[in-house]
Image (cartoon, rainbow, N blue to C red):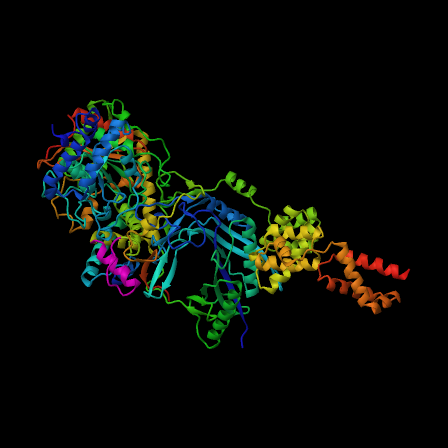
Amino acid sequence: MKNYEMVIGLEVHVELATKTKIFCGCTTQFGGLPNTHCCPVCMGMPGTLPVLNKKVVEFAVAAGLALGCEITRHCRFDRKNYFYPDIPKAYQISQLYLPICRNGGIEIETDTGKKRIGIHEIHMEEDAGKLVHDPWEDCTLVDYNRCGVPLIEIVSEPDMRSADEVIAYLEKLRLILKYLGVSDCKMQEGSLRADINLSVREVGAAAFGTRTEMKNMNSFKAIVRAIEGECKRQIEVLSNGGKVIQETRRWDENKDTSFAMRSKEDAQDYRYFPEPDLVPLVIDEDWLTRIKLREPELRDAKMKRYMEEFDIPAYDAAILTGAKRMADIFEETVAICGKPKEVSNWLMVETMRLLKETETDAEELALAPEKLAALIGMVDAGKINRTVAKEVFGKIFMEDADPEEYVKEKGLTMLQDDGLLREALSRVLAANKQSVADFLGGKDRAFGFLVGQMMKELKGKADPGMVNALLRDALASYQK
Amino acid sequence: MTITDETITYVAALTKLSLSAQEQEKAKEDLGRILGYIDTMNELVTDGVEPMSHVISLQNVFREDEVTNKEERENLLSNAPAKKDGAFLVPKTVE
Amino acid sequence: MDITKLTALELGRQIRAGGVSVREAVEAHLAVIREKENDYHCYITVRKEEALSRADAVQEGILSGQYTSPLAGVPVAVKDNICTKAVRTTCASKILGDFVPPYDAAVVERLTAAGMVMLGKTNMDEFAMGSTTETSYFGVTKNPWDITRVPGGSSGGSAAAVAAGEAGIALGSDTGGSIRQPSAFCGVTGIKPTYGTVSRYGLIAYASSLDGIGPVGKDVADCAALLSLISGGDRRDSTSVPQDRFDYMGALKGDVRGMRIGIPKGYFQAGLDAQVADAVLAAAKVLKEKGALLSEFDLDAVDYAVPAYYVIASAEASSNLSRYDGVKYGFCAPDHKDLQEMYKRTRTEGFGDEVKRRMMIGAFVLSSGYYDAYYNKALKVRALIRQSFDRAFENCDLILGPTAPTTAMKLGESLSDPLKMYLGDIYTVAVNLAGLPAISLPCGCDDQGLPIGLQLIGKPFGERDILRAAYCYEQETGGAFCGRC
């Protein structure tokens, strides 16, 4: 049995977080009834013309700079011509000859170490509409709401050799793009889509094998499954003396496998040519500098700042900044309550635990900073104890519960009433004479038991500090 | 210039046209003559000339990222040959 | 007084002075349409009722001071490739036969804001591809000077309507000569402005880098007035040049003293009808007598303008016309069994022969393996043509020549031989490739009594130069040739 290795390159489509589409003033908002986020321009109606959204260029340049690319100072758009109902003009405005960014790369880290993944180019283009099968008519419904949403396509070099590297690359890419604010990178909503070009070759071979392209994976998990499956399939084909056919394959999530897409009736000849309706784009030094200056704080800077400004340990700072969403929640909560250590603690421990438990991606974390801040405030004010606080946090995390209302509703407020505490104390001391005697006889462990009994008696709502103090006082008086 | 049947079939496929046998012959002849005439461009030496895709010197024409359009589905669908539930209706595309 | 014989500016003056009501102006033109349209067929759509009710509204607007334009109240015809809200816009094609745009073209907004009254949409070659208006799905337009002849094209309906008094003035579009050549054939005046002067928003694209909208009128002043109205930057068209609206009327001085006029030697060689050559050279002499300085020169690369034009225009057309696929608007072939069949039948049944021919040429020159040899080569030839003009304009203010090599052909003569028809564009296409302004105006008739067109070409944004010379010539020779038929 020969040894094979995978060679993988990625084409990542990222929807940019602009308010409007790339060539018209329609909203890019996700969802909406079919064809309600459309106008004559994005529907390609006769006589209409595109006008470029400036923000798209700035986002593309910002992405290029953060991904170590050269910026093409004189670039332009081209038309890619093909027929399909999801592109209303029968051409997609894209960039072939002079893409806006070229020759970049990012460093990834996997179990096998650090590695640089090259980025061949980044180009700007418009997204297509959505086709939905209508089972009643056995027809397809066309919705152009997504049509014209700005995309950048990030084309990597074929530098990846494993699914691990692919995921590391995608995670790094996503983190950078999210920090830049150029995309929300939600795979479920299709704002980050990766097409995978994969081939296998014998270890040590210089030439690449024939590659296939896989589309339609909408989670990292699916990507891993698709890579593993396709690698296995190609090796089987080759081992059986067959040849891999260059083709596009579609991942079927339900069947957990990929299928060759029916080859289009005619040849793929996109007849690219310069888009005459848009004028050339010149990115001068001045503009480039302005875009650079506007670059938000990226992860490394943020980590450093957390360590310096909030005195957070390096390890914690790395976790807090490991997802843009997490860092945002951290900062927003700190801004409200002014307690970085407490906030960090809730995020590092309880949040991470619940994310793991619920198999939620940190970037999808839904946690209202004002609610977390309120919770911290309640603990701080001695209104609830830590045990109750954990329970309340769970409710905030899972159900977006309002902490104050929840505590009130469930009667979880810590007992501050001295009389109630003293009543409980006398009941506990009376019921546990043996333990009192044990303690007085020098068995320190009996103190913990008595505290536990107190808490039980008070249904967990007492301030442990107060319980401790009361109990100590009472026992001391016995000793006397 | 001689245009082959394959070429005509190819460009007809690219432009989504069907040609009868007679139209195919006529297209072969017409395109052959027209492209033959177009080939006279080759008499002109164009080495080192920058191709001119845009005739005006305008560059960097933009719009700001502001929502200016309102919902107008009714208008946009008013010319549709086939529609259903606010969407255009086409023959099945899903594989 | 025959209202339909007045120039648009004169009619506008009388309307504002109260001598003619807008309704009278509209009714007079509708009467000519009623009388002559069966013979000429200038229009695809006539909006009789709408024009009359609009006339009354405009009349009020003039009285209230809302409309002050010199063309307020003037009945105008619009070429049927310019989108008009709620008015069918067909491009003279079956494939857009029932298309009703939900928006107005930028130029139509301008006409409306000025208080002009649209009478209807004029006939044209299908998608503006042709030089005779014979490729229209809605039938041919005939030349009002001789109904056995073509009106030229592709804006044949607009030129014929103005010549016949079926419209006071009209809008056309010019991609390779489509305003100038029919203006020449019909004895009217037409301007193709500098690329970027008039917004293309709402002009249904044939070849985006060459297309332009311009006026067709009874004389130079009418064209200058309409051009003033429609020119100026538009944020919806990225290729429109941001500039204040130009007032071209100031260029109409009746004097050309010291203007340098270049005459390309190559324009007067084989292929040019001798009577056309004589008339054009006689016109040059008139301008010389008025003080212009004439010189001859070589416009070398321009010899290759026709092939370069057909490559570029066809390439862009093949892409622009791909959107007509039966999904969103227009004709869709019934009873298709699947998507591919729907595409093919819709497009095969929906487009005419000339359009199909150009789409196939366009797909070919862009296709893998031929892009460099054809499309990119043509873009380089285009660059050389522009350079050639730039050099010429170092020594002259405008270039004078014929608009077309002959006068109007007999109906049916050109259709059989597309290549021959393409060669008829020899004097006009270079102007589009270089993005220059040019005017065609009448400069006499041949022995058949058919009008001959004089073409004046200006430097980029040199509309004033060509208007000044054209107006001077017109004044000197006794005004327009309109109203002869």
Instruction: Give the camera-side residue of C29 and A365.
Output: A365
State whether residue C168 is above or below residue A8: above
Left or right placement of residue A331 versus residue C265 in this view: right
Relative to C325, is C246 above or below?
above
Q: Is residue C395 visible?
A: yes
In magenta segment, residue C333? yes
- What span is in magenta? C330-352
Quadrant that contains the C terminus of chain A: bottom right
Residue B45 location (% of width, % of height): 33, 45
Q: Position of residue A150 (x, y in %)?
A: 44, 50
Point out residue C122 in the picture as x, y percentages from the top left corner: 20, 42
Q: Is residue A188 above or below residue A332?
A: below
Of residues C27 and C135, the one drawn nearer to the viewer in this rendering: C27
Which quadrant does the N terminus of chain A fall into? bottom right
Residue at x 73%, y 64% (from the top left corner): A456
Name the one closer to the observer, C228 or A111: C228
